[in-house]
Amino acid sequence: MLMTNDSELVNTNTINKERKLAAIRSEIIEMPAEKALDVILDSPFPATLVQSFPDQDLHFLMYNIGKEDFIPILSLASSQQWEYILDVEVWNNDRLDMTQMTNILSLLYKADPQRLLRWTLKEKTEFLEYYLFKNMEIRIREHDEDPSDFGDDFATIDSIFYFRFPHSKDKIETNESDELMISEVSDTAEGSGNSDSYGKETEDEDSENVIYDDTEIIGPETTETLITNMLNTLADMDMSVLYGMLLETGTVIPAETEEEEFRLKNVRLAEKGFLPPHEAVAVYQPLKTEDLKKRPSIFLTKPFVDSDLPYPPLYPGLMLQKQGILKQFSTNRGKNLFASALEHLNKNEDIAINLQSELAFLINSVVSADKKIVRSREELENIVEKTCCYLNLGMELIHSELTISGILNGSGTLNIKKNSGLTPEQGAFILSNYTLKDIFRVGSGAGIALKERARNWYTQSYIAKIGLALAFLDESWFAVVGGLFLDKPLFFDNYKNGVLYRPFTSIQDIEYTTNILESIIEIDKMTKIIEPDPDLISIKFLTWKTLFMTLWAMKRMGIEKSSDGYFIPLNKFKPFFVQLLNLKSGKQKNVYSGGKPDKKDEQSEPFGKIAKVARDDFFIWLGEAGIVKENDEISTISGSLLKSTTRKIFNEVFDEIEDEYGSIVSEDVDPKVIYHFIVQ
């Protein structure tokens, strides 16, 4: 019985210790860099504190404090934490990057030289030998050879093993600002079968994502110095181990070694959510709300603190707690819905930690799927914001029982039950019942469905058939479609929240983009009915607004196509435009109805506004030209206003003309700046 009590006491002390360390870590990662470094080093048990950090948090803390200043903390870190830093730093897709290997190994060597060598020789032998093989040439002096036979570029420790660094012979030029310019060199190590260049990124389709923020250029001199120091240190530790390592280095098969190291790295990182990109991209696979499966009820309530599971990273959760981080992606209700719901669940410690672990795994999957390299807080904040935007949208869609099958089927209809005000409590219920990955897939799937709808339309569109560029859609519509045509579709925000494009965040974003896409499809159909003349299509900067407004004006003014093409003569355009916008009060013949103007309407119509009779005349012309059905548009003139897509589209055009030109006086009409009409 006493043993049971002692066991419970030990368990309670362990839990209290973990909670205390977690609280200290939370404070440290929010501190300024200088203060955080001092707090860690001044801790009564700095090694325990450092090794309690989740691997990802320690990695971000390294860049927050600065790599050189972080060396004392690296000396206290565990081998597992060292290995994580190597895994995320030295790989460029599926290739080991020699520059970054030198960079990180130099830091670890400065932190603890002997420990680095013991660890790599015992647990990462092939990794170390591969690095040496790619950067040095090793030869053994035979009994009948003289040291002078090797040349001045060879060095030795024991007069038996001789080595040289082929890259050290390359020229290093110094420019006027004393910056090193590293020349491209070939790997001349025997049996390498490959070539690497220093100071140059690996050339592949994602090389633009690789960004090094080192303050100094890592070149051949740095590599030579590091390897020489490592060999000298190992010789001081154990000469026989040095001999064995140099002998094995010459037998390395680089392709096999690199492939095996890549496999092991993927296995280690997959445990944290960093799946290979071709697997991680499944996080964007669309998921319908009706296909959602509930999570096991026991998942969120299982104990975490006293288990053997590692603590989840703290950075993502702390970023969510900041009011400013998600401000630009907040909903109309204020704070991001996901952040509010998560905050509501944080009252239960086990649920909070389990959700933090699940969120960290999801964020890492997004990082892998997007092929991003995240080293700073700002870069991580962008990923956290993106993830939370899709989670917010997914929660709204689940709550509103959104049916996205209309988009997926290409019918263009959305069956949306209006959001009745999703509260944090209701959001917490959704998080408790569905996995974050599934909620994310519901949110991202809505944007991807819109993308597929847009692509399916464009491949069969009339404007693509006749060779019109997407600029024909005019600036605003072109920007919306451009966001949908990206690999990961984005919402065109137009700097309303400080950015040009951002992830879809709410149902309102989906509805707005869907309405724009439907309008584009409608205009494409109308353009096909018109079948514009090739001379008209060839006009520079032609847009759909210019096309329809010009054809209508030419028809009403009795202007036909001339030998020079389609345009409105300047002497006829000015009177037409002045009357269209009522820019002056003179009594003029009404060119829209063919009769005299109604005095009552004319007197009551304010200056700078397009009269209803002019708008109705435009829709009459659409009916006469067979562009719209008579029972759809024509009936709106004599009957109640029908909110059809076509009438809505062109009423917005007339409103735009009013906003841009309604404040000018008739004498200032300049056709050169009026892009809605073709004037000559």
Image (cartoon, rainbow, N blue to C red):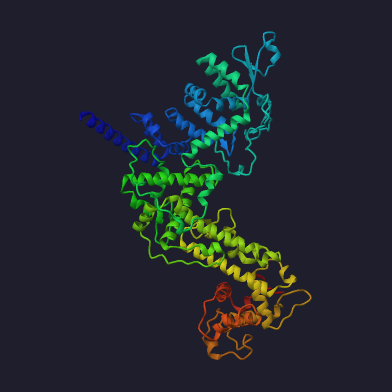
In this rendering, does residue 215 appear at all? no
Residue 19's place in the image compared with 616, above or below, is: above
Q: Quadrant of the C terminus?
A: bottom right
Q: Quadrant of residue 174?
A: top right
Q: Which of 134 and 220 lies nearest the eye of the viewer?
A: 134
Residue in the image at 54% along x and 76% along y: 644
**x and y, in percent, of residue 629 in the image:** 60, 80
**x and y, in percent, of residue 499 in the image:** 52, 56
Q: Is residue 395 left or right of residue 642?
A: left
Residue 567's place in the image compared with 307, above or below, is: below
**x and y, in percent, of residue 478 in the image:** 60, 63
Q: Quadrant of residue 614?
A: bottom right
Q: Which of 6 and 150 lies nearest the eye of the viewer?
A: 6
In this rendering, does residue 227 appear at all? yes
**x and y, in percent, of residue 284 in the image:** 52, 52
Q: Residue furthest top?
A: 144
Q: Is residue 292 left or right of residue 534?
A: left
